[in-house]
Amino acid sequence: MGRSANLPRGLRDRFRARDGVWPDDTGCRMLHVDMDAFYASVEIRERPELASVPVVVGGVSGRGVVCSANYLAREYGVRSAMPTAHARRLIPNAVYLPPQFDLYQEVSRGVMAIFRDITPLVEPLSLDEAFLDVGGALRRLGLTPGGVGELIRSRVFADHGVTCSVGVAPTKFLAKLASGMCKPDGMMVVPSSSSTLEFLHPLPVSALWGVGAKTAARLEELGLETVGDVAATPLPRLRRMIGVALAEHLFALAKGVDERAVVPTSREKSIGAEETFEVDHYDRAVLRRELLRLSERSAGSLRSKGLHGRTISIKVRFSDFTTITRSRTLPVPTDVTQEVYRTAVELLDTQVPPGAVRLIGVRIEGLDNADSAQQLIFDAPERGWREAEQAADQARSRFGSLAVRPASLLRDSPERTAEPEPKPE
């Protein structure tokens, strides 16, 4: 919702910072920083001649999806997660680029370092956005929250050549709304006062966190079109209309109440990888080889982060878009590629029916720190797959990702899009 053009312009103008002037930011300790068209912006930074043309980053093949699009491309209706084929129909003359995730991660690490230099209370949501609680940093910096927001914007651009938008508010919910409404390259401040509701209540119900398209349609059928309509509805009646849990959640947000704090460290719940094939595959040998490649990537991520996982799951999407997942929990947590792969293949062979497969994935869940996940196993060899894979990790970190590979992955592999695709609407 925050990026919708269907909002009262006067509302945006009233709360948006302009020429170093913004509304009263007293008590607005929450910031939400969101990079502007992040992947596309990084690509344009690398190739400045693209600044004046539509740029789309994503899978460039027929089954790829859009990861990012600059604002010129968005004017034609191109959006993230849209099939690339659809984007090409909307704007065939755009520049289409494959993603460079290593580059984006490098820039993201630099941007997050700027945030953490300002406050230790940083909660990343993805590579390109984070919440910050700057309440404890204001005196040290000699700035107000809005001043911190401007400092962040200037440092991100000076150090990394990309822009970001900043929402400043008393709560996380309002800060995230504000950052979306001031894009691109802007800052918006929602005061901690009666002005909060003046900002919030004219917005459509889709502005409320947790309201998707179906819930928004249901609320509108009930005559609740704006946030103010939800706030004005007696809570007992709202409970009868949409259920107790949802009613209480939306009613609180509509009143501007959000007690969530910034959580600086968030423990990962799972690690995995998936791929969409260029053409559907029936051949189980091809699927097993892809499972090995995905297991290698996923287990390598575990080892790099000092984690072990207990539950192995696979995801299979067939040609008709039917999608199934199958999982198995191991007696002992692991970070060994061969153990992950062996379990994934057993799931494929015993629990997945035959059919044409367009997407396959591996995921490792039930994560814990490697030290705490250790368990003594009688008759275990002193050295084995784990040591070999750790040595391979070191070789890859020094000589590149292709320095050491399983022999079965050296043969010709099926073409992949590099990006999983959403089911078409």
Image: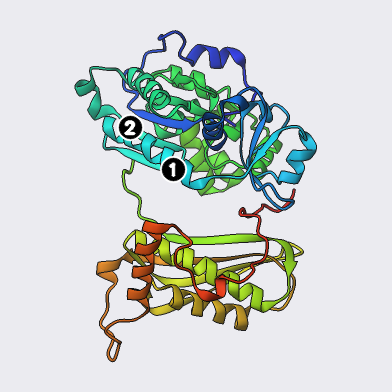
Which quadrant holds residue 99? top right
Report the disc number at residue 114: 2
Residue 143 point in image, percent of width and height: 27, 17
The residue nearer to you, when weighing 182 against 220, is 182
Q: Between disc 2 and disc 1, whose residue precedes?
A: 2
Q: In the image, 377: left or right of 421?
A: left
- What type is the residue that disc 2 sits on? Ile
Residue 298 point in image, percent of width and height: 46, 64
Q: In the image, 176: left or right of 346?
A: left
Residue 27 point in image, percent of width and height: 31, 22
Q: Is residue 124 above or below residue 392?
A: above
Residue 63 point in image, percent of width and height: 72, 53
Residue with the mark numbered 1: 125
The residue depicted at 62 percent of the width and 45 percent of the height is 98
> Visible in this render: residue 92?
yes
The residue depicted at 50 percent of the width and 18 percent of the height is 198
Q: Is residue 292 above or below residue 22?
A: below
- What type is the residue that disc 1 sits on? Leu
Please, what secondary structure does the residue beneath circle 2 have? helix
The residue depicted at 65 percent of the width and 59 percent of the height is 416
